[in-house]
Image: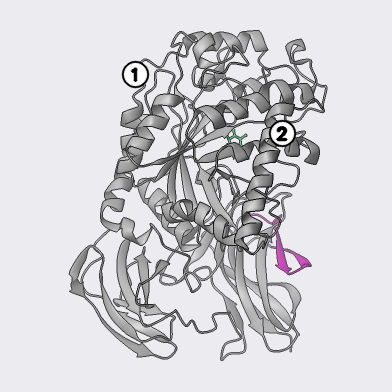
Amino acid sequence: MKVKILVSLGISLAIVIIFFINSCTGSTEKKQKEWIDPLNETVEQRNARMEWWRNARFGLFIHWGVYSVPAGTYNGEQIPGIGEWIMRRAHIPVDEYRAFAREFNPVKYDPGAWVKMAKDAGMKYIVITSKHHDGFALFDSKVTNWDIADASPYGKDLLKPLVKAAKKEGLKIGFYYSQAQDWTHPGGAKSGYEEGEYWDEAHAGDFDEYLNHIAYPQTEEILTNYDIDILWWDTPYWMTKERAEFLRPLIALRPGLITNNRLGGGYSGDTDTPEQHIPATGIEDRDWEVCMTMNHTWGYKSYDDDWKSSEDLVRKLVDIASKGGNFLLNVGPKPDGTIPQASVERLAEIGDWMDVYSEAIYETSASPFRRPWWGRCTKKELENGDTRLYLHVFDWPGDNILRIPVLNDPVQCFSLSDKESVFKNEKSNNSLLIELEGEAPNEICSVIVLDIKGEPQVPDQNIKINDDGVLLLTPEESNLENRGYISSNHAKLVRNNELSYITWKETNTWMEWPVEIDQQKAFDVFAVVATASSGNKLIVEVGEDKNIFMLPETGGLDSFEKIKIGTISLPTGISTLRLKGEKEEWQQCYMSNLELAPVK
Ligand code: GLC
């Protein structure tokens, strides 16, 4: 591989100097797990670098490019899948795709208004696609003509004014850069293809040459010419360790830069990036950011109208914050530079909620206790060493009582939307009971502030065998993980006084519970379930142990039955019990309680 010797030398020199300074100041050289750092940071330095990002919690993702011109339709045919992948999905030849750029003329582009929209929604940063997999750069790149300045009638850089507007409003800004996949420049990687394979002769070329002549110098351009805070790599197809190590030193060009985990070659960067799903209980020991669309596509698709509701989006933001993560929520602007109205409306509605409640999101950390049935919790350490708990109430309790699983003494408790409205609270049996009054102040999510003395002391929260000798796993207490791309297919909890249940359509959804037993035992597993199919197989996973059970038909989705599905063994101590569906022949079912009764 040819290397840009001069730049690399410069960077190596910088690394040596930084290392030297560190050794002189005697800082402890503790390395983060899996973090191989060209900047040779200490943990303290890294924490300082990540601070604004950890406090921000909420950002705007923007996927914008030439793909917004076909907007999901090619040769009269609606192409399935995400809009920005149309070139790959429909195997559009390079020349034909290039022609779309002539219609990419964002005369209505108003970067100031975009930044204002993000800021009003309560977002603290923006990440925009500087180059997506189609290879088209939204900046004026000197190493190609396949960019906004040379290939579109607009003829000038789109990113400079956005960076400027963001900085002016105090927002941080990042660039997404597709370092490996490039479906236009010769040699670029293509998902589903081996190196050297392609769908158009114009692709012929060597991947290392591509990295050397396009990815490397473009990364250098964006890191040198733009005052950016984040570099968001993506889809590391064909990236080996050696190739990642070729690009990676470039990040030293911009001190303070934050990068994600998608460079490839085993480099985990600063942040994990769960895409289109929220991890059931967050991600331990890592900074993480859920990226998500409001409909099903990142890049604009004219006919994708299946939008998540504002309520859903606010609750997702709260859910993510309660697990200690960030939310990067996407918009896909049109070729004229306007943002779809449905997205604008949703951002405004999220902003209405944030206007009142953002204090319960920014600078907070994960809930000290397991998800309560009524909503979520975030927390903040107060200056005097006490803890502020923000109780995000999705479901206002019918009896007005909120039970908070902490052992601390209460200090004060009030409604965040009306600080005058204070609530009685008292200690009771391993928890604090709050007596709410009246109606929920906010339909989407009301926030109650509870200050407690000192650091949270949380009683053991694992699910144990109850007085009837049964381990009862309820849908309300389950942690749900929905991996599917189509959010309308996601499993949801339906709360019902008689019987709550989870609507379960897809096998990339699962439920999990933390369980604890004194002594290894065999249990009969009973499922309270409703299903119209006799082909479903349930998987009960405990650690490495995987049990597969047939689920007989119950006579339809409105007919719940308690069925014994099989027997499993639980190990002594704490474990996570996960309920999954076997892919083959899976059909929607409604899942209520899972009851584990010791085998007699
Ligand atoms: C994916 C897709 C892409 C999108 C990104 C957002 O990896 O390839 O089109 O940009 O995820 O997370």
Helix, strand or loop status at disc 1: loop
Instruction: Give the x, y percent position of residue 115.
Output: 35, 35
What is the spatial separation of the Cα atoms under label 2 and label 1, in whole angstroms? 43 Å
Q: Is residue 543 magenta?
A: yes
Q: Amino acid at mark 1?
A: Lys
Note whether 213 is above or below 544 in the view shown. Answer: above
Q: Amino acid at mark 2?
A: Leu
Say which quarter of the image contains residue 561: bottom right
Left or right: residue 513 compared with residue 371: right
Residue at coordinates 72% horizontally, 30% vertically from top-left? 191
Magenta portion: prevailing SS class: strand
Is residue 346 left or right of 226 when viewed as pictured?
left
The residue positioned 34% from the left and 77% from the top of the image is: 384
Q: Is mark 1 within 8 Å of ligand 1?
A: no
Identify the coloring. Answer: one colour
Q: Is residue 496 visible?
A: yes
Residue tagged 2: 9
Q: Residue at x 47, y 49 (%)?
A: 327
* Residue 188 in view: no
Is disc 2's CB within 8 Å of ligand 1? no
Residues drawn in magenta? 533-551
Q: Nearer the viewer, residue 265 or 299?
A: 265
Q: Which residue is mark 1?
A: 108
